Amino acid sequence: MFNEKIKNEHLNRLSSEDFKTKEKLPVIVVLDNIRSLNNIGSVFRTADAFLIEQIILCGLCGTPPNKEIEKTALGATSTVGWSYFSSTVEAIKDLKNRNYHIVSIEQVENKTWLQNFHLNDKKIALIFGNEVYGVDQSVIDLSDEVVEIPQLGTKHSLNISVSVGIVLWEIVRTKI
Amino acid sequence: MFNEKIKNEHLNRLSSEDFKTKEKLPVIVVLDNIRSLNNIGSVFRTADAFLIEQIILCGLCGTPPNKEIEKTALGATSTVGWSYFSSTVEAIKDLKNRNYHIVSIEQVENKTWLQNFHLNDKKIALIFGNEVYGVDQSVIDLSDEVVEIPQLGTKHSLNISVSVGIVLWEIVRTKI
């Protein structure tokens, strides 16, 4: 009924060389003190798939090269650009100076529901917070907008790498 | 500028009791031979957040109760309904008998791109495949539709728990 699965070598993915020069989505993912190296690696893999401009690792985030990150990044640490700031607040200030629209992914009263979020033509930085504490209040206070993923069940939050995938997809789906 | 973060106890999440009786999205997630218990737990957590009807674990998938699954499920194994089939093909045949529209998430020629996928009023089963081998060809052959997540970078696929989050969000976003 369906054709056979497409073999990996026929998926027409970019080479690492072509990835470097390819125009990226004007989106930077900022990870605010993410503890799990597994989650960080998974974010690299998703950022590669959706051609994200850069990942900024902040605070206690581990950085490449790292065996645990690589387990889930599967090589995406060598394609996706990244930098490190010890302070998330300093990273945000730098992004504001570079005219990025700062968007924290959190649960506050005055938020935009994800399905109503529009990138328009802005360059944006998306901030995802620590697995337990979320995005730090000092970072939320510096944000231009807060976006929340609607959640209907019993748990308080989604896994961070799943959240990154969902929010990036919401942006990418309108661009293709 | 923004209100403070909403405390967990003020998020108005469902209690476990209310979850049981709440009307679910008519979506069953079928995991075809997923090796990683971490991924399985994460799928439970996402299924809880998006009020999914059920998870069907097939083949070599581990099942609750399991410490490794619980690390990422964070209790969602006691809210989200699940069952186990040793054969994914048998699980699909059972779902077809119950009039579910069978949708494999894979990369084939004759696919629907995720952004064009519409649930309409169908009851659907979404099949996600093994981390290395994807959805088995015998399962694709039994599917009514194959949906592919567009990927623009160098890697061949997304992490399975990220893929589940993205596909479920694409369905949920139109329902809220």
Image (cartoon, coloured by chain):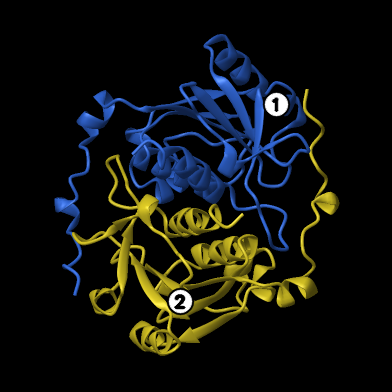
Chain colours: A yellow, B blue
**SS assignment at label 2:** loop
Residue at (35, 34) in percent of width and height: B51
Residue identifier under label 1? B139
Which quadrant of the structure image shows residue B82? top left
Judge from the rendering whether residue A63 lies leftward or rightward of residue B71; answer left or right. right
Most extreme residue toward the front is A121
Is residue A49 visible to the viewer in this orientation of the structure?
yes
Whole-percent x and y of residue B148? 65, 42
Instruction: Identify residue type, mark 2.
Output: Cys
Q: Residue B34's spot in the image, x, y percent? A: 61, 40
Q: Chain of mark 2?
A: A
Q: Are marks 2 and 1 on the same chain?
A: no
The answer to whether residue B38 is above or below residue B109 is below
* Count of numbered circles on the image: 2
Residue shown at 58% from the left, 47% from the top: B160
Instruction: Please identify the quadrant where the N terminus of chain A is shown.
Output: top right
Chain of the residue on which disc 1 is drawn: B
